Structure formats: structure tokens, C-alpha cells
């Protein structure tokens, strides 16, 4: 495996499948006494320049379960917030810790951190990618008996960081992905090109949510206004009208299709209360699986 995990394409298909297998093993073991603690004595630094519930808590608890320790570093309490260069922070932290998680705005910031750090760097979300989320989603799909290589996924809404990571996963594993979004809100063009050159998926951007949902195994959605875009909220609310995952869209999908959302959700915007709380919703399994997938990643990257 590469030193860092900044995007899904940092993994090969066999590596991705191995991470999911290891995540399943961590999930089965639970937190019982006698479970292996491969990261005893190891420390993870977690730099968060955006808010987080799931990513922060799942990495922190995951690190504890692996026998290690995690440090939460917010810009308010560190020199990062006062403008200490990323390359200096990377080199200093690498003298103390065994791994770094970074959640930030520009993807280039995470890349710079990885280039200068002597220890593995994991992307906990940037404006362009959210690989840990999509790994947890893939694990959840597998648990529901869905074949990752042959599935059909409909991503409804904004072509954002999560959508970009889905594009990469589709090409890496070879499944079908339809992204339904309004004009101007497509997944990142460069990522679409790079992923298509790297893989064999069937990825298409469409306008009509029901066209994307037709025959889908998974309906996926995320917020219409991501962190950092708050000033665009009103424009986005208008642009995404008609892109809500509701019961009628779910009826267009395959019988037994599941609904996913990375959370946090805005009920009544990208998803209805009924769908979110309904029997087809897998959202809390996805949230739980963040921890198992990240334990798999941490144990592989840090003990490398
Ligand atoms: N899905 C996700 O990354 O959630 P948080 O923003 O709470 O970490
Ligand atoms: N697209 C969302 C995901 C939050 C987990 C954001 O970037 O805010």
C-alpha cells in the first residue's frame, strides 16, 4: 500500500477489497478483552479545519481500540490556525506521531501535508475527496449483500467531495454510477477524467434523478451545501429543487434498494424524513462502519 490515503485511487482494487475484509474482521471482534491492539504505544494526530462528528469520534475511538492514542488538533488551539506553514507542521508532527489525519479545505493542503510528512497521512475530507466515507459505504453495501463489482449506484444531488470519491470507486471496482445533478454542479471534471483513465466503471452524469434511480441498488445523497459553501446556500436551495430522495424516487429504484447518506442530513432538503427513517435506510450502519474501515486503514498504514 502507498504511504498515504488521500483519495480512493491511492488504493488498487485488491487493496481496497483487503481493507474492507480487514474492516469486517475488526467489526466482528468488537471491543472485547483480548482483542488485538496492534497500535499500542502509537499516536495519531488529527488536524481538523472543519467541523466533524463522525470522522473525529470514529478515528479517535478506533485508535483507542487499536491500543493507541489520538490527539485532536483544532486550528483554534494550535499554530496551524495562526498560519504556521503546512510543510513545517508536517515535519514537526512526524517527529512525534505515527500518523496524521487531516480534514481541510483545499485538497492540495492534504497533498502538501503528505509530501512533507514522514508518517502516513489520511484524508478525513477535503473539498474534493472523502475517501474514508466511501470506503465505509462500500462496506455497508457488501453487508447488505450487494455485489460491489456489479452494482448500480445513483448519486442524487451535488457533485461534491463524496460524489467525487464515488466516481473513483466506480472506476476502480467497475460498477455503474449515475450522478444526477443540476447543470453546474457536476463532479470535478479532472477527477472524472483521471478516474476514467484509471479504471473500468460505467459512470455517467445525468440531469433527471429518476433516470439515475432506475434499477439502482443504492440511492445515495449528501447535503446540497457543503462545509465552506455556506454563502451559496440560497442559490443552492433553488438549484437543487427536485433532487430530493423521497418515496417516489425510491420506487423508481430496484425492489429492495437501499438508501445511503454520509450524514449530517438536512431532512426536507436532500432527503425526506420518511426515507431517512424508513426501512431501506442504511445511514446509521454507514456511520458505524466509518470506525471499522478506519481501524483497518490505521492498522495497515501505521504498521507498514
Ligand atoms: N460523514 C462525515 O464525515 O461526518 P462528519 O462531518 O460528522 O465527520
Ligand atoms: N459534502 C459534505 C460532507 C460532510 C461529511 C461536506 O463537505 O460538508
Image (tube, helix red, strand yellow):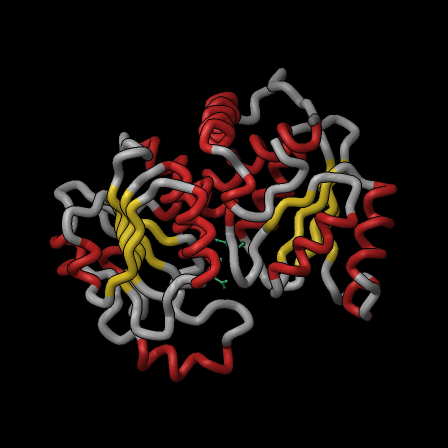
Residue 134: horizontal and vertical position, in percent?
44, 45
Look at 26% across and 35% down and name the residue there: 150
Q: Is residue 283 above or below residue 293?
A: below
Residue 94: horizontal and vertical position, in percent?
82, 43
Which one is nearer the viewer's eye here, 203 or 241? 203
Look at 79% across and 29% down and name the residue there: 41
Q: Is residue 167 above or below residue 32?
A: below
Residue 77 picture quarter: bottom right
Left or right position of 209 against 66: left
Left or right position of 215 against 267: left
Which image quarter holds the N terminus? top right
Left or right position of 39 against 232: right
Residue 58 picture quarter: top right
Which one is nearer the viewer's eye here, 157 or 250? 157
Which image quarter holds the C terminus? top right
Tell which residue pokes out farthest to the front in this image.
197
Q: Is residue 137 visible?
A: no
Residue 161: horizontal and vertical position, in percent?
47, 59
Residue 196: horizontal and vertical position, in percent?
40, 49
Left or right position of 27 against 296: left
Amino acid at each position: 500500500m502507498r504511504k498515504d490515503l488521500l483519495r480512493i485511487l491511492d488504493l488498487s482494487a485488491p487493496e481496497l477489497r483487503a481493507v474492507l475484509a480487514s474492516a469486517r474482521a475488526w467489526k466482528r471482534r468488537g471491543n472485547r478483552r483480548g482483542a488485538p491492539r496492534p497500535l499500542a504505544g502509537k499516536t495519531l494526530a488529527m488536524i481538523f479545519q472543519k467541523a466533524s462528528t463522525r470522522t473525529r469520534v470514529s478515528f479517535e475511538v478506533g485508535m483507542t481500540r487499536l491500543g493507541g492514542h489520538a490527539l485532536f488538533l483544532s486550528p483554534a488551539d494550535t499554530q496551524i490556525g495562526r498560519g504556521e506553514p503546512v510543510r513545517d507542521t508536517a515535519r514537526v508532527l512526524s517527529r512525534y506521531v505515527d500518523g496524521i489525519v487531516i480534514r481541510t479545505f483545499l485538497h492540495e493542503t492534504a497533498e502538501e501535508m503528505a509530501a512533507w510528512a514522514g508518517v502516513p497521512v489520511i484524508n478525513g475530507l477535503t473539498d474534493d475527496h472523502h475517501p474514508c466515507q466511501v470506503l465505509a459505504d462500500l462496506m455497508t453495501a457488501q453487508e447488505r449483500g450487494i455485489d460491489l463489482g456489479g452494482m448500480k449506484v445513483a448519486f442524487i444531488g451535488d457533485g461534491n467531495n463524496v460524489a467525487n470519491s464515488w466516481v473513483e470507486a466506480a472506476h476502480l471496482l467497475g460498477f455503474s454510477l449515475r450522478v444526477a445533478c443540476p447543470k453546474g454542479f457536476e463532479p470535478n471534471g479532472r477527477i472524472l477524467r483521471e478516474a476514467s483513465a484509471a479504471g473500468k466503471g460505467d459512470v455517467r452524469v445525468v440531469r433527471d434523478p429518476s433516470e439515475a434511480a432506475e434499477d439502482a441498488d443504492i440511492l445515495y445523497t449528501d447535503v446540497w451545501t457543503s462545509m465552506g459553501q455556506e454563502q451559496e446556500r440560497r442559490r443552492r436551495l433553488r438549484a437543487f429543487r427536485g433532487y430530493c430522495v423521497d418515496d417516489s424516487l425510491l420506487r423508481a429504484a430496484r425492489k429492495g434498494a437501499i438508501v445511503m447518506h454520509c450524514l449530517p442530513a438536512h431532512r426536507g432538503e436532500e432527503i425526506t424524513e420518511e426515507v431517512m427513517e424508513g426501512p431501506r435506510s442504511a445511514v446509521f450502519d454507514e456511520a458505524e462502519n466509518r470506525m471499522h474501515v478506519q481501524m483497518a486503514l490505521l492498522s495497515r498504514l501505521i504498521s507498514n
